[in-house]
Image: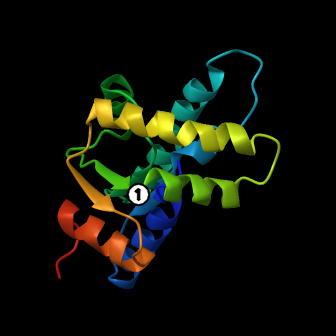
Amino acid sequence: MGAGKTSVLAEASDILSLRHIVHAAIDMDALGLAHLPSAGGNDSVMCRNLESICGNYAASGVTRLLLARAMEDRAELELCQSIVSAAKTTVCRLTAGIATMQQRVRARELGLLQQQYVERVATLDAILDRARLEDFAVINENRSVSDVAKEMLLKAGWISP
Protein backbone atom coordinates (compact mmCIF):
# COMPACT_ATOMS: atom_id res chain seq x y z
CA MET A 1 0.00 0.00 0.00
CA GLY A 2 1.39 3.33 -1.05
CA ALA A 3 4.19 1.89 -3.16
CA GLY A 4 2.57 3.33 -6.29
CA LYS A 5 1.20 0.23 -8.02
CA THR A 6 -1.81 1.94 -9.56
CA SER A 7 0.10 5.03 -10.71
CA VAL A 8 2.95 3.00 -12.19
CA LEU A 9 0.46 0.63 -13.85
CA ALA A 10 -1.23 3.55 -15.60
CA GLU A 11 2.06 5.12 -16.67
CA ALA A 12 3.44 1.79 -17.93
CA SER A 13 0.25 1.38 -19.96
CA ASP A 14 0.76 4.85 -21.44
CA ILE A 15 4.37 4.03 -22.35
CA LEU A 16 3.30 0.80 -24.05
CA SER A 17 0.46 2.57 -25.88
CA LEU A 18 2.83 5.23 -27.22
CA ARG A 19 5.02 2.41 -28.56
CA HIS A 20 1.97 0.65 -30.07
CA ILE A 21 2.49 -2.46 -27.92
CA VAL A 22 -0.79 -4.33 -27.50
CA HIS A 23 -1.51 -4.95 -23.83
CA ALA A 24 -4.08 -4.59 -21.06
CA ALA A 25 -3.57 -3.01 -17.64
CA ILE A 26 -5.65 -4.27 -14.72
CA ASP A 27 -5.74 -2.96 -11.17
CA MET A 28 -6.80 -6.12 -9.36
CA ASP A 29 -7.81 -4.31 -6.17
CA ALA A 30 -10.56 -2.56 -8.14
CA LEU A 31 -11.95 -5.95 -9.21
CA GLY A 32 -12.75 -6.87 -5.61
CA LEU A 33 -13.92 -3.53 -4.27
CA ALA A 34 -17.13 -4.62 -2.58
CA HIS A 35 -18.67 -5.66 0.69
CA LEU A 36 -20.14 -9.10 0.16
CA PRO A 37 -22.37 -11.19 2.42
CA SER A 38 -19.80 -13.98 2.93
CA ALA A 39 -16.38 -13.71 4.55
CA GLY A 40 -13.54 -14.18 2.09
CA GLY A 41 -15.94 -13.58 -0.77
CA ASN A 42 -14.12 -10.54 -2.11
CA ASP A 43 -11.03 -12.50 -3.16
CA SER A 44 -13.03 -15.21 -4.92
CA VAL A 45 -15.16 -12.60 -6.72
CA MET A 46 -12.02 -10.67 -7.63
CA CYS A 47 -10.56 -13.85 -9.16
CA ARG A 48 -13.73 -14.58 -11.12
CA ASN A 49 -13.77 -10.98 -12.33
CA LEU A 50 -10.13 -11.30 -13.41
CA GLU A 51 -10.89 -14.54 -15.23
CA SER A 52 -13.75 -12.88 -17.11
CA ILE A 53 -11.70 -9.82 -18.02
CA CYS A 54 -8.74 -11.92 -19.17
CA GLY A 55 -11.05 -13.94 -21.39
CA ASN A 56 -12.41 -10.75 -22.94
CA TYR A 57 -8.91 -9.39 -23.57
CA ALA A 58 -7.71 -12.73 -24.99
CA ALA A 59 -10.67 -12.73 -27.40
CA SER A 60 -9.48 -9.30 -28.54
CA GLY A 61 -5.95 -10.54 -29.23
CA VAL A 62 -4.27 -9.26 -26.07
CA THR A 63 -1.37 -11.47 -24.96
CA ARG A 64 0.38 -9.09 -22.55
CA LEU A 65 -1.17 -8.19 -19.22
CA LEU A 66 0.04 -5.73 -16.63
CA LEU A 67 -1.51 -6.50 -13.26
CA ALA A 68 -1.26 -4.36 -10.15
CA ARG A 69 -1.63 -6.28 -6.89
CA ALA A 70 0.32 -6.84 -3.69
CA MET A 71 0.75 -10.63 -3.70
CA GLU A 72 1.14 -11.75 -0.11
CA ASP A 73 2.02 -15.41 -0.65
CA ARG A 74 2.97 -17.94 -3.32
CA ALA A 75 -0.50 -19.50 -3.36
CA GLU A 76 -2.05 -16.15 -4.32
CA LEU A 77 0.56 -15.67 -7.05
CA GLU A 78 0.00 -19.17 -8.43
CA LEU A 79 -3.77 -18.67 -8.44
CA CYS A 80 -3.32 -15.44 -10.38
CA GLN A 81 -0.96 -17.17 -12.82
CA SER A 82 -3.48 -19.93 -13.43
CA ILE A 83 -6.25 -17.42 -14.09
CA VAL A 84 -4.34 -15.38 -16.64
CA SER A 85 -2.86 -18.51 -18.27
CA ALA A 86 0.42 -16.69 -18.80
CA ALA A 87 3.19 -18.40 -20.71
CA LYS A 88 5.60 -16.26 -18.70
CA THR A 89 5.06 -14.24 -15.54
CA THR A 90 7.39 -11.57 -14.22
CA VAL A 91 6.80 -10.06 -10.80
CA CYS A 92 8.03 -6.56 -10.00
CA ARG A 93 7.93 -5.21 -6.48
CA LEU A 94 7.70 -1.47 -6.15
CA THR A 95 9.45 -0.19 -3.06
CA ALA A 96 9.55 3.03 -1.10
CA GLY A 97 10.27 3.94 2.50
CA ILE A 98 7.55 3.20 5.07
CA ALA A 99 7.11 6.90 5.86
CA THR A 100 6.67 7.72 2.16
CA MET A 101 4.15 4.94 1.65
CA GLN A 102 2.21 5.97 4.76
CA GLN A 103 2.16 9.59 3.56
CA ARG A 104 0.80 8.49 0.18
CA VAL A 105 -1.91 6.36 1.79
CA ARG A 106 -2.83 9.18 4.17
CA ALA A 107 -3.21 11.57 1.22
CA ARG A 108 -5.19 9.07 -0.86
CA GLU A 109 -7.47 7.54 1.77
CA LEU A 110 -9.49 10.39 3.21
CA GLY A 111 -12.36 8.40 4.67
CA LEU A 112 -13.29 6.44 7.75
CA LEU A 113 -10.65 3.73 7.40
CA GLN A 114 -7.70 6.04 6.76
CA GLN A 115 -5.83 5.21 9.97
CA GLN A 116 -6.39 1.48 9.54
CA TYR A 117 -4.93 1.68 6.02
CA VAL A 118 -1.96 3.78 7.17
CA GLU A 119 -1.20 1.23 9.90
CA ARG A 120 -1.45 -1.63 7.39
CA VAL A 121 1.43 -0.20 5.31
CA ALA A 122 4.23 -1.48 7.57
CA THR A 123 2.48 -4.82 8.14
CA LEU A 124 2.04 -5.43 4.42
CA ASP A 125 5.63 -4.37 3.70
CA ALA A 126 6.88 -6.96 6.20
CA ILE A 127 4.66 -9.64 4.65
CA LEU A 128 6.05 -8.86 1.19
CA ASP A 129 9.61 -8.91 2.57
CA ARG A 130 9.03 -12.44 3.89
CA ALA A 131 7.22 -13.68 0.77
CA ARG A 132 9.98 -12.62 -1.66
CA LEU A 133 7.88 -13.34 -4.74
CA GLU A 134 9.44 -10.68 -6.95
CA ASP A 135 11.78 -11.32 -9.86
CA PHE A 136 13.09 -7.79 -9.37
CA ALA A 137 12.32 -4.61 -7.45
CA VAL A 138 12.09 -0.99 -8.57
CA ILE A 139 12.44 1.93 -6.20
CA ASN A 140 9.49 4.32 -6.44
CA GLU A 141 10.60 7.23 -4.30
CA ASN A 142 11.99 10.64 -5.27
CA ARG A 143 11.63 9.76 -8.97
CA SER A 144 9.12 10.51 -11.66
CA VAL A 145 6.42 7.93 -12.28
CA SER A 146 7.60 7.81 -15.91
CA ASP A 147 11.12 6.80 -14.86
CA VAL A 148 9.78 4.13 -12.51
CA ALA A 149 7.41 2.67 -15.12
CA LYS A 150 10.10 2.70 -17.81
CA GLU A 151 12.58 0.92 -15.52
CA MET A 152 9.96 -1.71 -14.70
CA LEU A 153 9.18 -2.33 -18.38
CA LEU A 154 12.89 -2.47 -19.27
CA LYS A 155 13.67 -4.98 -16.49
CA ALA A 156 10.66 -7.08 -17.51
CA GLY A 157 11.94 -7.12 -21.09
CA TRP A 158 8.81 -5.51 -22.52
CA ILE A 159 10.64 -2.54 -24.02
CA SER A 160 14.18 -1.67 -25.01
CA PRO A 161 15.96 1.61 -24.36
Q: Picture coordinates of residue 85 (x, y %)?
A: 31, 38
Crowding near the residue tagged with mark 1, few <14, some 14–19, many ≥20 C-alpha atoms within 10 Å? some
What residue sits 49% from the left and 68% below the top?
Answer: 10
Coordinates of residue 96 in the picture (x, y in percent):
40, 57
Q: On the image, which quarter does residue 42 sit in?
A: top right
Residue furthest front in the image: 99
- Secondary structure beneath dot 1 equals loop
Residue 117 in the figure: left or right of residue 7: right
Looking at the rendered structure, the number of numbered marks drawn on it comes to 1
Image quadrant holding the C terminus, namely: bottom left
The residue wearing badge 1 is 96
| Residue for point 44% across, 74% down | 145
> Which amino acid, mark 1?
Ala
Give the image quarter of residue 155.
Answer: bottom left
The answer to whether 24 is drawn above or below residue 102 in the figure is: below
Colour scheme: rainbow
Percent x, y for residue 147?
34, 78
User: Horizontal and vertical percent for residue 95?
Assistant: 37, 55
